Amino acid sequence: MATRRIRSAAVAAAVAVGVTACSAPGGGGTGDDAEAAESVVIGVGSEPDTLSPLLGYGKDGNSKIFDGLLARDTDLKLEPALATALPKITDGGLTYTYTLREGVKFSDGEPLTAQDVVYTYRTVLDEKTNNTARSELDAVKDVRATGDDTVVFTLKYPYAAFAARTVLPVVPEHVAGGQDPNTGDFNTKPVGTGPYVLTDWSKGEKLAFKANPHYWGDKPTVKSFTMAVIADDNVRATRLRSGDLDGAVLPPNLAATFENDEGRRTYEARSYDFRAVTLPTSGKVTGDRAIRRALDAAVDRRAMVDKILDGAGRPAYGPLPVDDPWYERGIERPHDLAKAERVLDEGGWKAGSGGIRAKDGQRASFTLYYPSGDKVRQDHALAYASDAKKAGIEVKVEGATWEVIEPRMGRDAVLAGFGSVGDPDFGLYTLLHSSLAGDGFNNMAHYDDPAVDQALDAGRRTQDPKTRAAAYDEVQKALVENPGYTFLTHIDHLYVLADRWDGLTTQLEPHEHGFASGPWWNIEDWQPKK
């Protein structure tokens, strides 16, 4: 695999609805094998809100339309992409210098210049741009071009993870610069330097791509692919079985039904993707620390892994997986109903009518929302409610669209999914820092702990590994004493595809998958099997 062409994933995700048939996939059993290999149809559960990196699309390098200065390989190692090499770091970690690759063109044929890079980062950092991931570039003081091929970043403080943030896709100033970044056509009609270009986007149905004729790397063998947006897991599995799809992302129980299918192969990817219940501090019930600590003890995480995930995952005791190098050993919380009851007793929550506890006239009852059509989240929510009831806490589970859920996130619990790879700062800061409470999907629980804020800032603002490790250890310990979420499971991602290509691999994946990751993260490198 040519490392200069490696990309992190396919595209980013949000929420969508079902889809009608798109086109016959190559695996349908008709036509010449070589021609069939040139077109692929993949079933995914959701679609992006936008295709503009200026608004956060592809910020982790997950795009087939765009490239960043750097990219990641199969093992998530940083590699040059639009840059000729990894950055030159000087001034004690405050200056990063990149030299651009020669001869790169955007898909409209115009050349890439250093000014395009400057425009991209300055626009993302502009407070007028509606990019909720802006805090991830907080360290940037200035970005400037030196000639046509050199870009220099000056940082406000040493930021150990900065190079990994430069997988951010670069956009053409000559196209996007004349538009409002929040409302312009670029959001749905992108122009980039990646191996593919968008040819059609039917919202809620499909996104179609074809090979970029101006791509600077080797030309892909897969000449076109379609991402069919199918929100319902069962429908996605049915269409895969019928031959309407070449591949799909599936939950464990449905992926298992394809294990013995000849001509199909299942791919399993480890991930940082966790499921958790947000417990807003403004809630009359969820705002009580005793309730949050009791739920942490009452939940049976191992049973969720075994019964809901069919073993394809791990119990989650915090945002970082138990096998992560930054994970703090000793924070595991076993299922302990007696402890949950004791915590509630000490917190003044006494047994009431129907076995539901109450305190000062307030019943221990709250609503938990999950996105409709997501069977895995639904099953987590129902299991959580069952465990909570045994401790005397009533959790009323409701499925709804994100349009219904989003306005309620600040006050109602949500069965949420998060998880970022590459550095602990990427996932922990946006999940927990009080300054980001209610900022889109950032800090959905409105978590506010001054000690945690201080530790997160310390971990972000130093390059010393020991100082960073101590900071993130403190964050994880604080979440035991003062949980703002009930962490449930870390999920392995499963994909089923027609076994017709070579070159398929999986990476250690973030929460966003399907579009954002999967065996098709490097679809431009696939070759038909001989």
Image: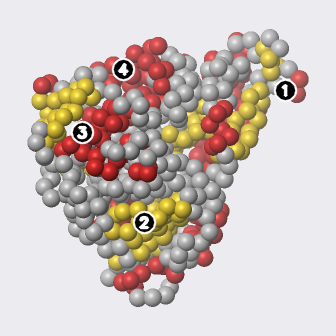
Q: Which mark is on residue 156?
A: none
At 40% from the left edge and 41% from the top edge, which residue is drawn? 181
- Helix, strand or loop status at disc 4: helix
Marks 2 and 1, how far apart at CA:
58 Å
- Neighbour tally class for label 3: few under 14, some 14-19, many 20 plus, Cα within 10 Å: many
- What's the residue type where badge 1 is placed? Gly
At 71% from the left edge and 19% from the top edge, which residue is drawn? 284
> Disc 4 marks which residue?
457
Q: Quadrant of residue 460?
A: top left
For marks 2 and 1, give the one nearer the viewer. Answer: 2
- Neighbour tally class for label 1: few under 14, some 14-19, many 20 plus, Cα within 10 Å: some
Of mark 2 and mark 4, the one earlier in the sequence is 2
- Image check: 319 left or right of 507? right
Of mark 4 and mark 1, the one earlier in the sequence is 1
- Helix, strand or loop status at disc 1: helix
> Disc 1 marks which residue?
355
Q: Which mark is on residue 118?
A: 3
Q: Which mark is on residue 199?
A: 2
- Neighbour tally class for label 2: few under 14, some 14-19, many 20 plus, Cα within 10 Å: some
The mark total stands at 4
Q: Judge whether residue 424 can be spotted in this image.
A: no
